Amino acid sequence: MAKKPLLEFTEKGIYCAQGKFYIDPWKPVNDAIITHAHADHAYLGHKHYLAHHLSKEVLLYRLGEINLQTVEYGEKIMKNGVQVSLYPAGHVIGSAQIRVEYQGEVWVVSGDYKTEDDGISTPFEPVKCHHFISECTFGMPVYQWKPQVQIFDDINNWWRTNLHTGVATVLVGYSLGKAQRILQNLDLFNGKVYTHGVIENTNEALRRNGVLLNPTERITPDTPKDEVRKGIILAPPSSVGTPWMRKFGPYSFGYCSGWMALRGAKRRRAADRGFILSDHADWDGLISAIDATGCEKVYLTHGYTATFSRYLNEIGFDAHEVHTLYGGEEDALSQPPPEGEEFEKKSEVKVSPTGGDLEGAAI
Amino acid sequence: MKAFAQLFLSLDETNKTNEKVKVLKDYFTNVPDTDKMHMLALFTGRKPKRIINSTQIRTWAVEAANIPAWLFEESYHVVGDLAETMALLMPQNDSSSNKTLTQWIAELNQLGSKTEEERKLWLLCSWAMLDSQERFVFNKLLTGGFRVGVSQNLVIKALADISNHDAATLTHRIMGNWLPETYTYDQLIQEQGAADDISRPYPFFLAYPIQETSEKQKSAEEIQGALGDAAQWQAEWKWDGIRAQMIKRDGKIFIWSRGEDLSTEKFPELHPFLNALPDGTVIDGEILSFQNGLPMPFNVLQTRIGRKNLSKKILEESPVAVIAYDCLEFNGEDIRTKTQAERRTILEGLQAATPYPETFRISALIDFNTWEQLAEIRGQSRAMIAEGIMLKRKSAAYQVGRRRGDWWKWKIDPLSVDAVMIYAQKGHGRRADLYTDYTFAVWDGDKLVPFAKAYSGLTDAEINKVDYFIKRNTLEKFGPVRTVKPELVFEIGFEGINKSTRHKSGIALRFPRILRWRHDKPKEEADTLDSLRALLGE
């Protein structure tokens, strides 16, 4: 009988039979290792969770009272004879690749990742392995990111122009990762940063975790509207077009996402400005990351898997498409429409009532 | 080109009309006059000549991008716009070019006399010279598909603001056949008249639809409430042909279709009557195929529209005539400000004098006293081979563009069937990377036979739901087309139905569109091919 692979793709998630644990499972299991705290990777209902230290407070905030063990990058844990360790994925604060080793065979699960150092998440680190399980959300050659410093110059200039012309500035990005990345790169000489409750809750969780973030002010019903309009408002996708957002009008509304690279997607969001800023690797980033692992086989979990695996095979990799349920968070392939963040919210509610409620919570 | 690329970017960056007008004005005030005219030509649908064919452009773009051809095609399906795909796929570049739009277009036009090798070299050098935004608009020039999120009205409004002319005058002056190389900005904004070009048509006046759904018809009282007394209105049949403006000036004749195409040569049957008109006459009307004094369905006319050469056979099988309904110029004088009733009198005079009453017909006025009466008459539209009724206020001037108030089209209900979606394809533009183009089928026994494609009628929210369904229920992929699990039922509306030998189903629909998503209907209850054939009226 052929040897069973160390990691398998099952109905519940990526499974290690030898170690009796799952990685980012989407159905309740006994032992789950979580790459990062986004809703499509960290589901509610597992008996035991393992994640990186910096994911701790956000996971507790999103999932409530869970049985959570956290570790440092590089720290080795044994599970039924299988060695497990976490390495930085550069996707969001606390995001990790999961390295799994048994009898000399090494598998790595990337979770979501980006190769550019965003200055706030621990930068991506390639890990040598035999088998690499990778995302490819932006696995098409039309996606080529510019260095973030250029994007933030554009954002800060846009904010200044808005101040000059007297319109408020609303910048939209998802609440864990993008919001903090933006926050740390805003030119605070322009004014103060005001946050939607969902983002501020995440900020507070990260601060409890010891992450140093620039000062922010939570928008409450008592916050003077005129003051807010002199600063910049950071808001999650679910708030677009809601009465909450409209009350700050007239405003210019910017959207930060990798999808903004295409005019069609940008027009669909009806954003005034689209800023091409993603927490996923672009085309070249994906290829260089896969190449750096020196892997024998690569498995593609979500994104443009068909196209990307065909291309990888042509340039000499042994690439395979696999079916998973990842890609449901904000940067999903089935791009939610402007109002469609509703859709995302609903799917979140189904699997994680607490997180879902919070994401959609009005303040 | 920098300014032109920036114009595109700025227009993309706002959804607000006022800001778009401001962006357009900024552009006009910052570029040389020749650039203004080129921009105007491009934004009003005057495509640049295609010197390099699109297969060559693609081939060279694949080379420049250094990726396999199949990956280029896949990318195109994701992006949904060829010019944008090419701009995104080429290596990023920080250089940028100082050449003006006029210079670029001139260089492009000179390629006509160059060899293929020279063209390729020019193209590769040009791409290397431009940054990605410039490359995108440059590619738009190459591929000729200039659709921007800006209507001609907005461009005219901006131009009117900076030139101190009213919008209607400018709209008239940019009608017809002109080239940005020879029509100058000074000519466009000169104080007096636009009579320099004898072929120039007037802007068409377009009717607004009286909105109705199949469930809710407008009552006579509602019409009375909205339009007032029936005595103030004239009613005519709404003909389904080609809207056209016919000009006789200085002994020459011109026929313009609504798309501002000069179509004089396409309708030789009309030349005798036009030549017989007095000089300085412009007539608005509908061109239709006629046989034995009766109008024929649109598809008869359609068979000859696309033809380059009109064979004797075609001229015999679908001879055309005009049903005139307005007169815009008489004795060389622009009479658009006269009332509908006055213009009608002049038109009747012209028609009465024609030696060619077979080809120069007049749109008969419908005799009615009350809206109830008219509503009843409207029921006979299909028998008249008309699409419904046109209402025109007797005191109204002939205006510019689509305006609410004085001209209304009151169409009859569209025909409809319930059909099952079986294929889907990704859309373009703002619908890129979303499945928005669908093929529908009806039952023929236990088989589903495709009979129509439609891609309009759903809301954005519905499109997203359908897209979600398609991505999870694909049975097969053929290039860009997905075969979808037959499950979703839609009501498809259309204006007309005809027999066709080119379609598998044996029928061809006119203006098919999605009326609504029938969540309530399982696929088994969709209509059959027989029920469609029954609508042929045979």
Image (cartoon, coloured by chain):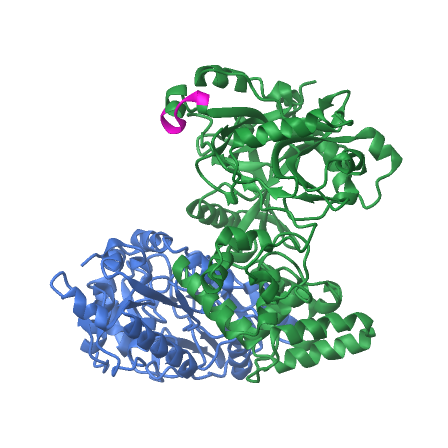
Chain colours: A blue, B green
> Which part of the image, by quadrant, shows the C terminus of chain B?
top right
> Viewed as shown, does residue B114 lie left or right of A20?
right
> Viewed as shown, does residue A100 lie left or right of B123?
left
Q: Residue furthest left?
A: A222
In the rendered image, residue A348, in percent from the top left (x then y), is placed at 32, 56
> Which part of the image, by quadrant, shows the N terminus of chain B?
bottom right
> Viewed as shown, does residue A217 lie left or right of B492?
left
> Viewed as shown, does residue B136 lie left or right of B353?
left
Range of magenta residues: B225-231
Q: Residue at x 80, y 34 (%)?
A: B272
Q: Main secondary structure of the magenta part?
A: helix
In the rendered image, residue A214, in percent from the top left (x then y), is placed at 23, 81
Is residue B280 or residue A238 the one in the foreground?
A: B280
Residue B72, magenta (yes or no): no
For the image shown, how many numbered marks are present on the structure? Answer: 0
Report if residue A209 is visible in the image. Answer: yes
Is residue B399 or residue A350 the one in the foreground?
A: B399
Q: Residue at x 22, y 68 (%)?
A: A229
Q: Residue at x 51, y 69 (%)?
A: B28
- Residue A49 picture quarter: bottom left
In the rendered image, residue A300, in percent from the top left (x then y), is placed at 52, 67
Q: Residue furthest right?
A: B312
Is residue A48 or residue B312 the one in the foreground?
A: B312
Report if residue A259 is visible in the image. Answer: no
Please say if B6 is above or below B190.
below
Please say if B173 is above or below B130.
above
In the rendered image, residue A329, in percent from the top left (x then y), is placed at 38, 62
Please say if B493 is above or below B462.
above
Is residue A146 or residue B1 the one in the foreground?
A: B1
- Residue B313 picture quarter: top right
